[in-house]
Image (cartoon, helix red, strand yellow):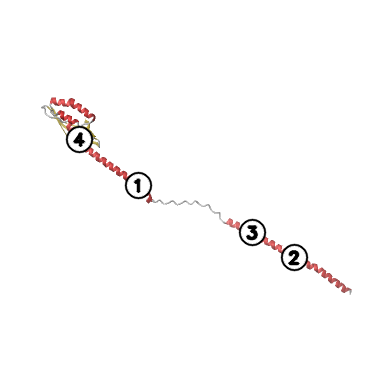
Amino acid sequence: MTDNADKVTDSPEKETTAVPVEADETAAREVTETSGVEAGADEAEVVEDTADADEAAEAETETEAKPKPKPKAKVKKPRRAVNWSKVLAFGLLPAVALLLAGAAGYLKWSDSSVREANTARIESLQVAKDSTVRLLSYKPDTVDQDLNSARDLLTGDFRDSYTQLINDVVIPGAKEKQISAVANVPAVASVSAEPNHAVALVFVNQTVIVGQSAPTATASSVRVTLDKVGDHWLISQFDPV
């Protein structure tokens, strides 16, 4: 009996001691689970932190890997092609036309001047020849008329000096000594000729008879200056050379 009682008594004790073991196991399991959850959470946080760090590192790596943009070089704008046709049309051609017009005007003026000078040369030479003959030719009976009419071929100071010479010397001497003179011009040359002024070189042969004496012939040359007064060429100087 006693042994059975002890057994009975031991059994409850064993059961009683088993309860705490199960509780401890349960608690331990809970703690383990809790620790596992916490550890999982920590691991998740670590994974997230690692992922974030990796992403940041990758971003930094990409940032570093990306080459820094080089400063843009200044691109020179291409020069516009010169439109030479327009340059010719609006620049060169008008200038050429102006030059041609000026050249044409100059040539026209030059041609006109040449023609006028040529006309002056021809007219002045003829007047110099004819006037010289009349100035140096006279007869005793008509000396007044001959020489005074020749005075109308003169102009300026020479007209005055010629008038004084014929009235003081030539006309009285021709009447008194019966002097006659005949002049002719074998040649005449133009020294210069302009529309209103000309110079001619006149070669003169003059034959003089005094009374009943033999004729005396002389040859001379005269530089004759002529000015155009109105429409007529008149002698302004008469200088023996």
Q: CA distance from mark 2 to mark 3?
A: 32 Å
Front in this rendered view, residue 190 or 106: 106
Identify the disc placed on residue 127: 4
Residue 196 x, y percent position in the rendering: 25, 36
Tell me the mark number nearer the camera, choosing from 4 and 3.
4
- Cβ atoms under marks 2 and 3 closer than 8 Å: no
Work out whether 162 lies above or below 78.
above
Pointer 2: residues within 10 angstroms few (<14), some, or many (20+)? few
User: In this rendering, does residue 30 appear at all?
Assistant: yes
Work out whether 86 lies above or below 167.
below
Q: CA distance from mark 1 to mark 3?
A: 80 Å
Instruction: Examine the image and state in which quarter residue 164 appears.
Output: top left
Residue holding disc 3? 52
Does residue 74 appear to the left or right of 23 in the view shown? left
The amino acid type, in three-letter code, at marker 3 is Asp
Instruction: Examine the image and state in which quarter residue 199 appears.
Output: top left
Pointer 4: residues within 10 angstroms few (<14), some, or many (20+)? some
**Residue furthest left in the image:** 212
The amino acid type, in three-letter code, at marker 1 is Pro
User: In this rendering, does residue 208 appear at all?
Assistant: no
Q: How many marks?
A: 4
Instruction: Examine the image and state in which quarter residue 6 appears.
Output: bottom right
- Cβ atoms under marks 2 and 1 closer than 8 Å: no
Pointer 3: residues within 10 angstroms few (<14), some, or many (20+)? few
Q: CA distance from mark 4 to mark 3?
A: 126 Å
Residue holding disc 2? 30
Identify the disc placed on residue 94: 1
